[in-house]
Image: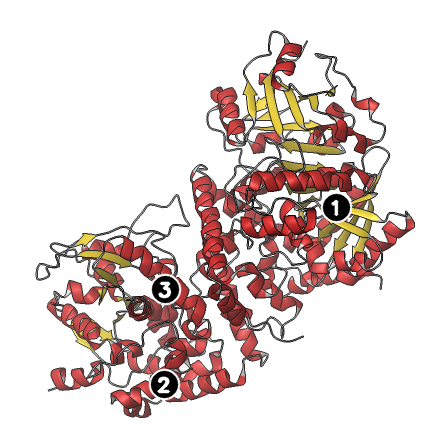
Amino acid sequence: MSVIDQAKNAAEFIEDKTHEVSFDKLIWMLRQKRDEAALQVPEWEQLRDLASAIKEHTLANLGPYLELFEANAKRNGVTVHWARDGHEHNQIVYDILKSRDADTLIKSKSMLTEECGTTPFLQSRGVKVSETDLGERIQQLDDEPPSHIVGPAFQKTTEDVAALFSKVYGSDPNKADPVYLAHVMREHTRPLITEAKAGMTGTNFAIAETGAIVTITNEGNADLSANAPKLRICSVGIEKIIPNNEHLAVFVRLLARSATGMPITQYTSHFRAAREGGEMHVVLVDNGRSDRLGMEKFWPSLKCIRCGACMNTCPVYRRSGGLSYGSTYMGPIGIITMPTFEIRRYSELPFASTLNGSCTNVCPVKINIHEQIYAWRGVMDEKHQTPSLKKQAMIIAGKLLSHPEAYRIATQSTETALKVLPRFAIYNHFNVWGRHREVPAPANETFHEWYRKNRTH
Amino acid sequence: MRVGLMIPCYVDVFYPKAGIAALELLEKLDIDVEYPFDQTCCGQPMANSGCEADARATEELFIRNFAKFEYIVTPSGSCTHHIRNKFIATPPSPERDHVQSHVYDLVEFLHDILKVNEFPWAIFPHKVALHTSCSAIRGLFMQSMSERVHDQKFSKPKALLQGVQGIEFVDFERHDECCGFGGTFSVTEEAVAAKMGYDKVDFIDKSGAEYIVSSDLSCLMHLQGCAGRLQKNLKFLHLAQILNGDKE
Amino acid sequence: MDTREYILANVRKNQPANHELPGVPRFHRQPELLVSEFERSLKYMAGEFLASPPSDFAAYLRENFPNAKTICSAVPEYAGDRKPEDYRNWADAADIDVTIVRSPLGVAETGSVLLTENQLRVNTIGFLAHDIVILLDPKDIVENIHDAYEHRAFRESKYAVLMTGPSGSADIGGKTVHPAQGVMTLTVVMWPAEL
């Protein structure tokens, strides 16, 4: 697949004016709410340290913890499946549904199933899949992937949603009122929920000691998916294991506050076993995670609890829109995880960052995100993913900047300086700089010249 | 105390006055300053682009130029952060270690080493919006960051500027959000970079500031370009020029 | 090698160096203010709070849920029109207007209440109903989430939910609105359990 041109996609998003402005405002508000919520918790930084340490411990002992989880889940009567990649996962899910004649499936929001492409896989095989999360459902109705991992439809304005619902449900296109639109959705989704033959959810945490799956939703989507139908399938990324309930407490306290600024999400739901009269399946999915675990610089990204705080604080994400990354995970966490899935396709993502470091400092599990972004840039060069024009410029800059005589000749007059400076400062021509900004004017005399005249005699 | 002065490439060519102010300021404080003639750059443009190998010769040149100094001072948080924390294109050596552990941004040098808090020669009766770079905040910890809500609030550049007579600071929205420069980012992602710059300029313009002041000229170069395009009547100065008492 | 073996082998091969598992402190602060803290937290999450049982609960329900035709009670304190067991098909609980249930645990820090299959009996009555009224003994309120996870329900129940306020969504324009797919209102009544 071709390389995602995030910069070009972002430029188009900004060009449109309305969406970039409302998206930035909305997402920045989440960052502010996160700050207010963190301020209410005096032990905030201690919780971040604990969360990071618990995740690091678990990942360092992931094999034993996975086996412990599996044993406990089985003891609870849960059927445990293992999937090496997205395709295996989808096939397992489909086989379960087919063998039980379940042709209607309701879903609670799950990034893992986005990652695996589960919905298109099942739909192409005749399963009717309905998302129950409002944001996820909006995206499904508009045939668009999520633009944010917590609020999939954040890139849409209220007016966009009103227009979409009017088209799909015949609601009033001029009533851009979130309460009204939420009512429309509730009305139309309820029958899908009560008639579904199977339910599917993702997983926020899987507890090794109890075998429980913990899924956190604002609408009770996991509760509905797990309890309304008798058949329930639960997808779990293998990095979602944590040791015990005592550790879960740390993450529950951090997750919603980091994500939305609320002290807790409305439904924090724990599923140890199937509902009465039902059956419960857990699919443990690797999909590149066990390989990433062995990447010295990048394994800490597996600590991620999908709160989206890094995205909310990221000034580049907020101006680019989530869809510009062309990927399942977007923003800072997407930049450091997507190349592990497909290096060529996502080779430009590490450059969609100013390396400002805000992401690292909001991350509730203390992933060194901006350092990993920097490290990924090095990997792209090592793996020859740097575009040739850029690489040539860097080689020239490297030569010029290591030879003072040549460098001085190049910068001693303003005309030559202008030709050369862009090369090393920004490798490209100032005409790109000048598209939206005034070009700086070189001074009549460089500092170097001034110093020679004024201090060396 | 022998100090080697590093003048970043873009300061040398575009903002020599800021370099001169930094030099004169150090001289006013009786520091023995030398500007090594063979200096070029710290190699950050290549390294930040992932081209570590292409940065090696430039890093080596830097180490040759500066290893002999007791302190290396530069009016740039960005270069300081790179040299201190990311100078790894060359293999480890005592010289490299020395350079990494003895490089200071001008603000750090004045605030932490010299512990200066008065600049009696400087008067600046203007409204100032202080923009501190991300390298300075989250790389060098020169200022508390808004993400760490429980940390004690502080700002080393502001503490220094408070020693200047007449200066007035204005608050503005999202004061420590990145301005959008980001080195090569400013060109590879020019649309996003410019939008970030426009937003920053707008927030500052609304605050009633006359000047945008920073200890990083790379941010200022970008913001000045954005303000120019937006036709905002804002003026730009490096912090060293104010502390040195330059008349602008 | 089958998939399970492959994944476990690759995980073991790639596990980073061991990191110690830290102990988790309980972060206790003001245990004497539990009920008021619970009330504040619950209201923040758009929940309703009643400091004591209404003298006439039936009248209270009529007044507050005037359009309710079907009230499902899972508690001995109130008879209701239906019992959870009336819903043999769990999805049918969608016809409930108001569910009455008792929670064995409240959390002051967040305003959450615990519900499990022991209280709900038919789990769907807890979120397919339009509105829910939850009885909670003030003695069952703990200070924070750390305390809450000491509860045995999280080790023993098949299903345990910490429910906090009515279901909500901020997916359109970032403003939290109710309704969403779960209950549209949630009321917690401080109601000591009968001895």
Name the residue tied to disc 3.
B197
Image position of B237 with respect to A344: above or below:
above
- The reply to whether residue B7 is visible in this rendering is no
Image position of A393 with respect to C25: above or below:
below
- CB within 8 Å, label 2 to label 3: no
Amino acid type of the residue tagged 1 in the rendering: Phe
Mark toward the start of the polypeptide (1 vs 2): 1
The chain containing the residue under callout 1 comes to A
Image-based side of B47 in relation to A235, left or right: left
- The reply to whether residue C87 is visible in this rendering is yes
Image-based side of B66 in relation to C161, left or right: left
Q: How far, Cα to Cα, is label 1 from label 2? A: 56 Å
Q: How far, Cα to Cα, is label 1 from label 3? A: 49 Å
Q: How far, Cα to Cα, is label 2 from label 3? A: 28 Å
* Quadrant where the image shows the C terminus of chain C: top right
Query: Which element is circle 1 on?
Result: helix
Name the residue tied to disc 2.
A401
Q: How is the image coloured?
A: secondary structure
Name the residue tied to disc 1.
A69
Residue shown at 72% from the left, 51% from the top: A236
